[in-house]
Amino acid sequence: MDYKRIQIILIITFSILNLYLITVLLEKDKELNAGDPSTTVRLEEGMRNDNIEAPELSDEQIRIPILKADKTDYLAEHAGTLSNQTTRMENNKLWSVLTNPIELDMSPSVPLEERLAPIETFMKDGNVLKAQDYSFLTYQEANQRIIYVQHAEEYPIADGTASLTFHLNPDGEVVSYEQTYIGLPEAQGKNRMVISEQAAIEALYLNNQIPNNSSLRRINLTYYQTLSLQDMNIYSPMWYVEIARDDVPIQVKYVDALTGNLISVPSIMNPNSSSKPEEDSVESSIEDAVLQTNEALDANLNVDSHSDRILIAE
């Protein structure tokens, strides 16, 4: 019997088996561990030790498409149809100062639906272009902004390129708003698998993006613009996470839902950005109102120089 030949065959067989096992191990390492109970336990234990409160995190992974939105001049073409307000366009954004402020009762004891009712009525009465395409996203109490956003494929577009932001004065009245609009987004190509809610929070936690003694208030699967071309924009899935702490403005963190990488968004969604219409471009009859609005907004802005930290207040 040729023992040397048998030995060579066994060595080759075990080498192939080892390569197979290594390949399997590497593939497992690439997985997001969405269904791994030990990962869930470690994440929950770590956040519990850091006094981080969170809802039950889903490990479900779904498939949603990349989106394409053709660029549109709809706002510029129809801004002149709006009444009881003075409007102007700048960089494809519609600025509006209301002739009559909208009174709101923003007391915490009042249900959110009732607080927003006057705004909803204002929108439904034809005072906002394409109002039916927007729905409520968040209320930033520290800088007095109420943000609505467009939806695509049942998910909000939360990067500010498709937003409707109402500005409040110190008395809790809506005195102006700014609007961006991307038309009707269309799905492109096959649906892509996104990371789970749990994996998104794990990415934030492992990168020290969730402070101790905080709570996760809102976790939404959304879209954000990843590419802007001459005639169209491309949008990809993104996890939107609001983090609340006592006596500190809400923070918002963003995770790319395809790669798991931490991302930032345009300053339009950043409460540190200065959202001001230029006074010399609006009618003189409301210049004082614009100035007062800007002063009220600037007084409530909470500045943070870190580009990867988006502060949101509730």
Image (cartoon, helix red, strand yellow):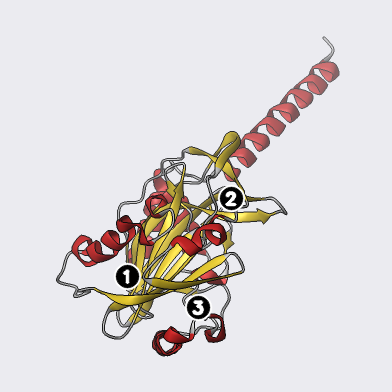
* Residue 298 in which image quadrant: bottom left
Disc 3 or disc 1, which is closer to the eye?
3
Q: Which residue type does callout 2 highlight?
A: Tyr
Q: Is residue 114 left or right of residue 125?
A: left
Going from N to C along the chain, the mark reached first, 2 or 1, is 1
Q: Which residue was labeled with disc 2?
A: 235
Disc 2 or disc 1, which is closer to the eye?
2
Q: Is residue 20 left or right of residue 288?
A: right
Going from N to C along the chain, the mark reached first, 3 or 1, is 1
Give the secondary structure at mark 1. Answer: loop
Cα–Cα gap, marks 3 and 1 = 35 Å
Q: Which mark is residue 275?
A: 3
Return the x and y of residue 138 as percentages of the image width and height: 36, 64
Q: Which residue was labeled with disc 1?
A: 51
Give the secondary structure at mark 3. Answer: loop
Observer-nearest residue: 217 or 231? 231
